[in-house]
Amino acid sequence: MPDSLYFNKEHQMIRKAVREFVNKEINPHVDAWEEQKIAPLHKLFKKMGDLGFLGIRYDPKHGGQGLDYWYDLVFAEEIGRIDAAGISMAIAVQTHMATPAINQFGSDYLKETYLTKAISGDMVSAIAVTEPGAGSDVSALATTAKKEGDHYVLNGSKTYITNGTQADFLTLLARTSDDPGYHSFSLFVVPTDLPGFSVSKKLDKMGMQSSDTAELFFDDMKIPVENMIGQEGEGFIYQMQQFQHERFVTLPLVYESSRKIIDMTLDHIRERVVFGKPLVKRQVLRHRLADWLTEIECLKCLTYHIVSMKMAGLDVTKEVSMGKLVAGRRVPADVRRPGFHVGDAHIAGISGLPPGIHRRRCRRSHVGDHRTHGGLLIRFIQVETHNT
Ligand SMILES: Cc1cc2nc3c(=O)[nH]c(=O)nc-3n(C[C@H](O)[C@H](O)[C@H](O)COP(=O)(O)OP(=O)(O)OC[C@H]3O[C@@H](n4cnc5c(N)ncnc54)[C@H](O)[C@@H]3O)c2cc1C
């Protein structure tokens, strides 16, 4: 009898390899990286690149594995088991946030120079969209790229950029025209070793300390024209498509890390005796755990449905937004609820449980706020109602 509806032996081999890597090369170090508020991404990504983990779906011509979405999901589930959300996010930026547009729309030159090196782990990448005045509303961004001969001159700033202090290149969205509308933006590969680039600030956060998040500044920075991805004026469209990969990868990260939080909570309430009984004997707590597990399973099933749709070549925009909506709600709930069960030990940080939980929190914001997806979904419902 097969032991899975979805995964075969080859999938399980990749799962085992990634899991062993996470258990050996990542999880033993996350306490130190959280403390240091940074992880050595060049060293880590090189090891992952050597094992072929950073290009699961990418073309073998560029060093990728050329595998399908089910393998991609296996990889994402396993990095979701990393004991610090900051590290899984740093990896997902490299594989699903900063490189899909180069792969889909970039020239051979860009693929050869940047994508290949991101896949091999020789370069660290970052995605640079958000600005101090433009978060959920990407079209409000003000960083400009003005064409002058064989260069674009970049001026402006980006904020909350993950991997920002270590990145060798940024996949960056800038305004290339003052005209209103979505065709006034272009997407660039911006090498961070050119004059005019600076990291203006490394940001302090409430969680995900091991992930370096930065504010970046561009002052008359000259970017060669060949570093533009695809066509001028199409960058907003490319980025919206790139966001689909970013949102998708968040789903397994959320349900795997939520599952681990619940397991940690369960371990704690099995041990903790209150009024003469382990907390786990209290029916109200058992029922609540069952509710959480069920919610997570629903998100997982939706994710598997999305993968089946992707495999069939169907558009998953609506389903991914639904997943994002659920995942965005799931994380704050997971952070709050085990705290409720472990009492003041959670707040004091002495139960053994809280550090893991704190390292796993804050997953929700880095791919945009989930509430904006509510608005997007209403548009789908209106169109579907109109068409029936
Ligand atoms: C840890 C971390 C890492 C990040 N990494 C990156 C990165 O690598 N690259 C990058 O480009 N960006 C990154 N971001 C930025 C992130 O994508 C933005 O924070 C996000 O898009 C929200 O933008 P904002 O913070 O400006 O919130 P705003 O757009 O100012 O929104 C504020 C609040 O208003 C509400 N809101 C906004 N729009 C709507 C709406 N339509 N309907 C209802 N409510 C709404 C929401 O509650 C939202 O939380 C990161 C953020 C964090 C916290």
Image: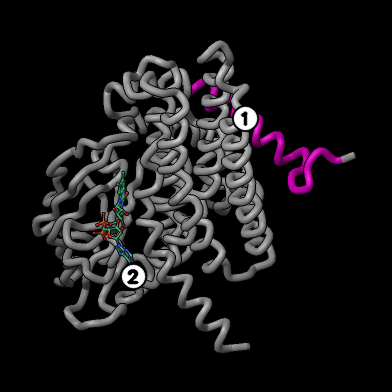
Indicate the secondary structure of the residue bearing disc 1: helix
| Residue 307 in magenta stretch | no
Quadrant of ligand 1 in image = bottom left
In the image, residue 287 sits, relative to residue 153, either above or below, namely: above
Q: Residue at x 38, y 61 (%)?
A: 371
Q: Quadrant of residue 128?
A: bottom left
Say which of 379 and 139 sits in front: 379
Tag 2 residue:
235
On-image quarter of the C terminus:
bottom right
Residue kind at label 2, given as amino acid type: Gly
Q: Residues within 10 Å of mark 1 (few under 14, many from 20)?
A: few
Residue kind at label 1, given as amino acid type: Gln
Q: Residue at x 36, y 32 (%)?
A: 42
How far across and how far down the image is residue 4, in percent? 78, 42
Indicate the secondary structure of the residue bearing disc 2: helix
How far across and how far down the image is residue 150, in percent? 20, 68
Count of picture labels? 2
Tag 1 residue:
283
With 164 as the anchor, is 300 left or right in this view?
Answer: right
Range of residues picked out in magenta: 2-26
Say which of 371 and 359 sits in front: 371
Q: Residue at x 62, y 22 (%)?
A: 281
How far across and how far down the image is residue 256, in percent? 56, 38
> Which residue extends farthest left?
219
Q: Tags 2 and 1 in contact by the CB under 8 Å rule?
A: no
> Which residue extends farthest front?
275
How far across and how far down the image is residue 312, in percent? 69, 66
